[in-house]
């Protein structure tokens, strides 16, 4: 929960600070800057200093060009209250007389910038995190492009890629390590691309069509290549009462072979199991230095109930980046994750990916925040950057109550040359709140279902 609160605090504060600072630059009064929603816990303003609990309405009316900076009860969002703007916090119509310091009194282009400023700040935050991570941490890459395993039924297998082939170019770009290969796969998702590989001193080319690669979740399996150098997979955990547990498999077991065929990577293990539903398999494992032969029968879906991992024991290389390169690579990271997020949203809308598999609510975000934090600072800030991109892209969608919904209203008013009625805008926000609440309920129930 702590890391969830930290994540929400940072992302919401940065987002709302964008609205706040842009509003102040254009002379808009911002009486409230809140981290969290609902009842005020405590806050500070120049008029009466630090106070606990709700702010006296009379004090709030006298704030004028001052801002009450507050922490509110519910850690599910936040807001910068812009004077003269009908938003999700507005419960009644605004006075007919318009004041020059109000949001509605500003020209459409200033209002557009103020509304977009939160999204811009989330994008800048993600860019800063990616760039900083590149500069301070660099990368550790698998120093090989030699193929160690080709998944059965993959596009690579169909294209004739074999164990021992060396990848020399991906999408027309030369690759020198497996990090380049992974980046090439991300950069070319949704596109046709070529892969050039060397075999026996000669170069060959394989074509991968986007239509064959499936949706975003299916890409790694459809691509189906592992580098040479992985150790035999080791079981992280075994689920009680499922086939593996019933056969005597235990956490810590190293998988040596299945039905006499050597297992050299996670993908090889997964393939061997999933391709033999309801068929008894002789699995050779090493436990505390001793070999044990266990017979396991996968269920009808080709699963045995284990979580496993595999360490890379091949050559590795440390890559360090200068400041300019880190910033440029940070922008590339930003574009890649943003594109993958857009693709995910598009695939959900097109029905190619189940919403319950891709969307996560507060429970799932809290789980991922905790899990990423357990991997260290680098893992946690990358998670925060990715969530910041998602927040930016979702917020700019043309949905009432989101920034994109406000922007649509502003652009419509600019095109008409007049303001829409306050009644319409209030009802527009109510529709948005209903949509968002429904989506939140769906995501919470989905989170609980997948626990």
Image (cartoon, grey):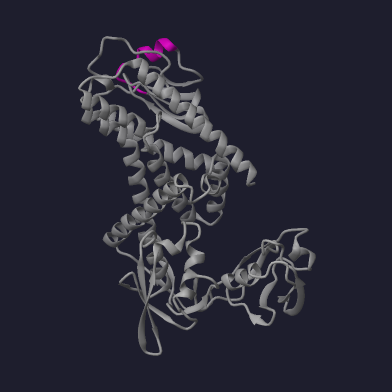
The residue sitting at the bottom extreme is 200
**Residue drawn at point x = 75 percent, y = 64 percent:** 243
Q: Position of residue 111 (x, y in %)?
A: 26, 28
**Residue drawn at point x = 50 percent, y = 57 percent:** 217
Q: Is residue 346 magenta?
A: no
Q: Position of residue 1 (x, y in %)?
A: 58, 41
Compared with 77, 166 (above or below) is: below
Question: Is residue 334 or residue 246 the one in the foreground?
Answer: 246
Q: Quadrant of residue 114?
A: top left
Q: How many marks?
A: 0
Q: Is residue 63 magenta?
A: yes
Compared with 110, 375 (above or below) is: below
Q: Is residue 191 left or right of residue 289?
A: left
Q: Quadrant of residue 396?
A: top left
Q: Is residue 234 left or right of residue 218?
A: right
Compared with 244, 60 (above or below) is: above
**Residue drawn at point x = 35 percent, y = 53 percent:** 334
Compared with 79, 213 (above or below) is: below
Magenta residues, start to end: 57-67
Residue 366 appears anywhere in the view: yes
Q: Position of residue 81 (x, y in %)?
A: 37, 24
Residue 88 appears anywhere in the view: no
Question: Is residue 40 or residue 120 the one in the foreground?
Answer: 120
Q: Quadrant of residue 266?
A: bottom right
Q: Position of residue 77 (x, y in %)?
A: 47, 33
**Residue drawn at point x = 53 percent, y = 71 percent:** 153
């Amino acid at each position: 929960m702590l890391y969830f609160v930290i994540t929400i605090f940072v992302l919401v504060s940065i987002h709302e600070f964008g609205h706040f600072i842009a509003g102040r630059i254009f002379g808009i009064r911002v009486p409230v800057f809140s981290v969290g929603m609902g009842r005020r816990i405590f806050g500070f303003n120049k008029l009466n200093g630090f106070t606990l609990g709700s702010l006296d309405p009379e004090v709030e009316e006298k704030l004028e060009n001052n801002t009450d900076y507050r922490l509110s009860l519910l850690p599910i969002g936040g807001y910068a209250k812009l004077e003269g703007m009908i938003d999700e916090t507005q419960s009644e119509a605004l006075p007919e007389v318009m004041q020059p310091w109000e949001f509605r009194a500003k020209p459409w282009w200033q209002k557009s910038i103020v509304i977009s400023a939160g999204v811009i700040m989330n994008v800048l935050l993600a860019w800063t995190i990616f760039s900083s991570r590149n500069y301070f941490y660099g990368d550790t890459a698998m120093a090989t492009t030699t193929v160690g395993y080709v998944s059965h039924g993959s596009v690579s297998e169909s294209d004739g890629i074999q164990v021992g082939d060396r990848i020399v170019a991906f999408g027309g770009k030369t690759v020198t390590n497996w990090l380049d290969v992974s980046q090439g796969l991300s950069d070319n998702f949704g596109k046709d691309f070529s892969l050039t590989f060397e075999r026996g001193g000669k170069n060959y080319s394989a074509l991968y069509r986007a239509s064959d690669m499936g949706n975003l979740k299916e890409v790694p399996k459809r691509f189906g290549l592992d580098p040479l150098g992985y150790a035999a997979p080791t079981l992280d955990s075994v689920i009680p009462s499922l086939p593996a547990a019933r056969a005597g498999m235990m956490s810590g077991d190293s998988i040596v072979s299945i039905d006499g065929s050597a297992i050299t990577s996670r993908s090889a293990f997964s393939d061997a199991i999933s391709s033999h539903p309801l068929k008894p398999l002789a699995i050779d494992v090493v436990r505390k230095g001793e070999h044990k032969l266990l017979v396991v029968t996968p269920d009808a879906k080709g699963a045995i109930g284990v979580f496993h991992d595999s360490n890379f024991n091949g050559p590795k290389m440390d890559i360090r980046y200068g400041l300019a390169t880190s910033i440029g690579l940070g922008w590339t990271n930003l574009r890649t994750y943003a594109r993958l997020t857009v693709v995910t949203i598009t695939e959900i809308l097109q029905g190619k990916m189940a919403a319950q598999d891709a969307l996560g609510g507060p429970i799932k975000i809290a789980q991922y925040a905790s899990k990423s934090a357990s991997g260290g600072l680098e893992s946690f800030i990358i998670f925060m950057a990715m969530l910041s991109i998602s927040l930016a892209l979702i917020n700019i969608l043309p949905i009432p109550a989101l920034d994109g919904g406000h922007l649509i209203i502003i652009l419509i008013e600019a095109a008409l040359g007049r303001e829409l009625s306050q009644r319409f805008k209030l009802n527009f926000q109510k529709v948005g709140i209903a949509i968002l609440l429904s989506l939140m309920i769906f995501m919470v129930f989905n989170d609980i279902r997948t626990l």
